[in-house]
Image: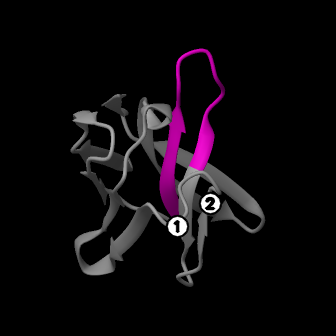
Amino acid sequence: QVQLVESGGGLVQAGGSLRLSCIHSGSTFSINSMGWYRQAPGKQRESVVTITSGGSTNYADSVKGRFTLSRDNAKNKVALQMNSLKPDDTAVYFCNLRDEVAPGMDYDYWGQGTQIAGSS
């Protein structure tokens, strides 16, 4: 059973910084990608940043230049450094692992979510 355990998050003033971490455990078939998604109240979950197994990253336009994803394969860990936070960044942030369980078939695992609240 794959598990994703997130840490970090909290309340931060506008312009501040926070760091989220996600460690995964359990057996996977072939990790396609990992990343962070967020869901603000009343909105759909959206991708913040993903990183493929090959190391390619894809950032949402709204966070480019402010957020940085890092990966430590030896520790099964991804981290998200968030700088220059804005009130619009307020959301529940979810760690995601996409596992290719069969050729062309992916399965998404999710962390429990961690709240980021930005204040102006």
Q: Main secondary structure of the magenta part?
A: strand
Give the class, few, some or many, for how many residues have Cα within 10 Å of label 2's Cα (few <14, many ≥20).
Answer: some
What secondary structure is marked by label 2? Answer: strand
The dot on residue 90 is none
Q: Do the residues under discs 2 and 1 have CB atoms within 8 angstroms?
A: yes
> Farthest residue toward the right?
104
> Farthest residue toward the bottom?
54
Number of marks in picture: 2
Give the extent of the magenta segment. Answer: 33-47
Is residue 97 shown left or right of residue 78?
right
The dot on residue 101 is 2
33 over 109 or under it: above or below: below
Looking at marks 2 and 1 on the same chain, the residue that comes earlier in the sequence is marked by 1
Is residue 14 shown left or right of residue 51?
left
> Farthest residue toward the top?
42
Amino acid marked by disc 1: Phe
Amino acid marked by disc 2: Val
Residue 80 x, y percent position in the rendering: 35, 59
Query: For residue 71, what is the image quadrant?
Result: bottom left
Residue marked by disc 1: 29
